[in-house]
Image: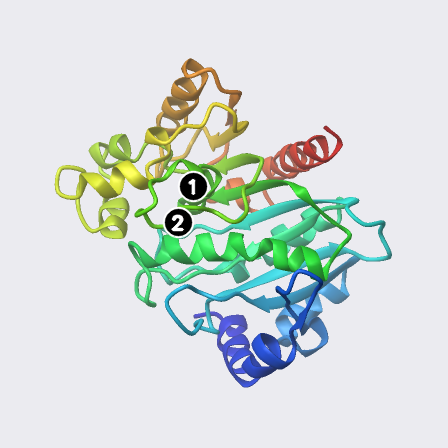
Amino acid sequence: MSTLRRTAGGLLAAMTAMTLVAGCSSDTDGSAVPAPIPASEAPDSFAQVIASSNVDAERYVYPVAEGESDHDQNWVDLFMPKGDHPDGSVPLVVLIHGGSWQSQIGADTFVTFARRLAERGLAVYNVEYRRLGSGGGYPQTFADVAAAIDFAPQIGKANPAIDMDNAVVVGHSAGGQLAMWAGTRHKLDDDEVGAKPKYRPTSVVSLAGPLDMRTAVKLGDDRIVRALGGIPEEVPERYTSVDPIQNIDPSMPTIAMVGAKDRVVPPVVSRNYVDAATKAGGTANFVLLPDTNHVTIVDPAAPAFTRVLETISRAAHNAHHD
C-alpha cells in the first residue's frame, strides 16, 4: 500500500462522522449533500501535487449498499480547475484505475493523470474501490464501482459548476473493463450486481481494457479468472453480466485505445469489441498507439500520453457542448 493510502486511511477513519453525518446537509429534495475532506488536510504527498498546479481537489467517502464504507478504499477524489465557474459549465470525467482488479495498485497512481485532465478545464472524479486482496473481487469490486458512480450526483450538488448531464467514464486495464461495464449497467437484469443505476455516463474511453473477456482468457489472461472466480465455462453468468462485448449498448459512444506493443491485454481484445459495437450500429472507434505498451499508455512521461489526454478532453468537451 502506498504512503498516500496508509496516511489517507487514518485520516478518513478519524473524520468519518464529519464526512458522512455531521458534514452533510439536506437540499430541497431531502437528499444529503456531502461534505468533503479538505485538500488542505489530505496527506502531504497529495497536497503537494495540488499545490503545484492550477487545480483544486477534495476527497469524499461514498456510501456502499451493504453497510459501512471502507474508508481506506471507498473514496473518490474530485479535481477541479481553480477559480469560479458558472453552474454546469465544467465537463465531467470519471476516472477508474486498473491493476488487474488487485489491491497492489490504487487510485493514488492516477493523481497526476487526474491533475493533467483538470488542467484542461475538466472536473475529474477519480474512483477508489475494493480489490482482490483487500475485500474486493466479484461481486464486491463491481458493487463498489457502481456505488461510486451512483454517488456522482451528490458530488454534483456540492459542486454545481460540474455538468452532470454528461460524463465520460475512462478506465485503464481492469478499469477499462469497469468503465465499459459502468456505461451499460442499465442493461442489467434487476438481480445483477450494479443494476438499476442512479447515474449513467454518456460515453466511455477504454485504455487497454479487456473488452472481450472470454477471448482474453483464451489468450491466457488468468487475472480475469481470478477476478471473476473461474473461467467462462465455470461461471458463465458472471461473464455474461460484466463482459463488455456481451453488453454492448449501440447508443453509448465508445473509444478503445490500446498500445501496439501491449502484451498484457493484446490489441485484438479491444479490436473485437469495436468491431462488434460497430456491427450493432454503435459509434465505436479503435485507436492503436504505436510504440506504446500496457503501462506507457498511462505514463505521463511517455509520448503517447499527450494523445490520451487530448482524446479524453475532446470527448468530454464535445459531450458538454452537444
State which quarter of the image contains the N terminus: bottom left
- Which residue is situated farthest in the bottom direction here? 14
N-terminal label among 2 and 1: 1
Q: Quadrant of the C terminus?
A: top right
Residue 286: x and y in percent read 49, 23
User: Quick check: marks 2 and 1 in contact, CB under 8 Å?
Assistant: yes
Q: Nearer the viewer, residue 95 or 49?
A: 95
Q: Secondary structure at mark 1?
A: helix
In which image quadrant can residue 55 be found? bottom right
Image quadrant where residue 80 sits: bottom right
Q: How far separated are the C-alphas under marks 2 and 1?
A: 6 Å
Q: 125 and 149: which one is in front?
A: 149
Residue 209 screen position, x and y as percent: 42, 38
Q: What is the number of the mark on residue 194?
A: 2
**Is residue 241 shown left or right of residue 95?**
left
Mark carried by residue 321 = none
Q: Amino acid at mark 1?
A: Arg
Q: Position of residue 315 (x, y in %)?
A: 65, 32
- Residue for point 52% across, 49% down: 198
Residue at image point 39% right, 62% down: 130
Task: Count residues near mark 1 (Cα–Cα under 10 Å), then give few for <14, some for 14-19, many for 20+.
Answer: many
Q: Which image quadrant is residue 66 in?
A: bottom left
Q: Which residue is mark 1?
A: 185
Residue 171 seen from this side:
yes
Residue 300 appears anywhere in the view:
no
Residue type marked 2:
Gly
Q: Position of residue 25 (x, y in %)?
A: 68, 72
Q: Nearer the viewer, residue 305 or 76?
A: 76
User: Is 160 left or right of 143, judged from the image as shown?
Assistant: right
